[in-house]
Image (cartoon, rainbow, N blue to C red):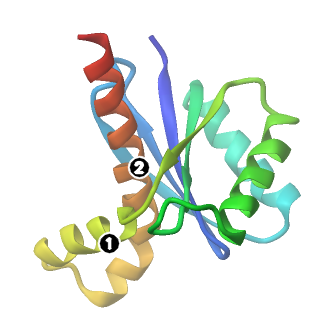
Amino acid sequence: MAALAGLDLGTKTIGVAVSDRLLTVATPLETIKRRKFTQDAESLLAILAAREIAGVVLGLPLNMDGSEGPRAQSTRAFARNIARLWDGPIVFWDERLSTVAAERALLEADTTRKRRAEVIDHVAAGYILQGALDRIRHVRT
C-alpha cells in the first residue's frame, strides 16, 4: 500500500493533503504559494517524492449545476502538465463545497481569521482527499 495526495488547486495557492498508507485518513499537510508553473511543479513533485505518493486526487471545481467552467478547464490543464513530469495516476474529484466544509470546520474549532486564511487551502485538500478515500473504502467492501 502507498499513500495518496489530495490537491485543492487555486489561482494563488495549492492546498496539499496526504493519506496514510492504509488509505483510511487524510491529513492536511501544507499550502504551496503559486508562482510560475515550473516552480509550483517543483514544490509539488518534491512533496510527492518525499512522501512516496502513489497517486494524486485533484479537486475539480465544477459549477453547482455540474458543468465545467474556466476553473475546471484550468485544473485539467494543470493535471496534463503535471502528468508530463510525474508518472503516477492523477484522478479528479468533485470539490464542490469542500472549501465551505473546511471553513465551517475551522469556525467550529474557533480558529482565528488569520489562522483560517493560512490553513483553509490544505484543510480543503484534506476534505477532497477524505471524500475519495471514503469512496475507495466503500468500493472495496
At horizontal 73% and vertical 51% (from top left) the residue drawn is 76
Comparing 12 with 60, the one in front is 60
Query: What is the C-alpha distance between the residues marked 2 and 1?
Result: 12 Å
At horizontal 37% and vertical 60% (from top left) the residue drawn is 123
In percent of width and height, residue 3 lies at: 47, 25
For the image, the number of numbered tags is 2
When asked about the image quadrant of residue 45, the answer is: top right
Q: In this view, does 131 lie above or below 50?
A: below
Compare marks 2 and 1 and give the one earlier in the sequence.
1
In percent of width and height, residue 96 lies at: 42, 62
Residue farthest bottom in this picture = 113
Dot 2 falls on a residue whose secondary structure is: helix
Q: Is residue 140 left or right of residue 69?
A: left
Comparing 23 with 64, the one in front is 64
Q: Is residue 19 left or right of residue 108?
A: right
Q: Mark 2 points at which residue?
A: 128
Amino acid at dot 1: Val
Q: Is residue 121 left or right of residue 86?
A: left
Q: In this view, does 67 lie above or below 3?
A: below
Amino acid at dot 2: Ile
Disc on res. 100:
1
In percent of width and height, residue 50 lies at: 61, 32
Dot 1 falls on a residue whose secondary structure is: helix
At horizontal 79% and vertical 49% (from top left) the residue drawn is 42
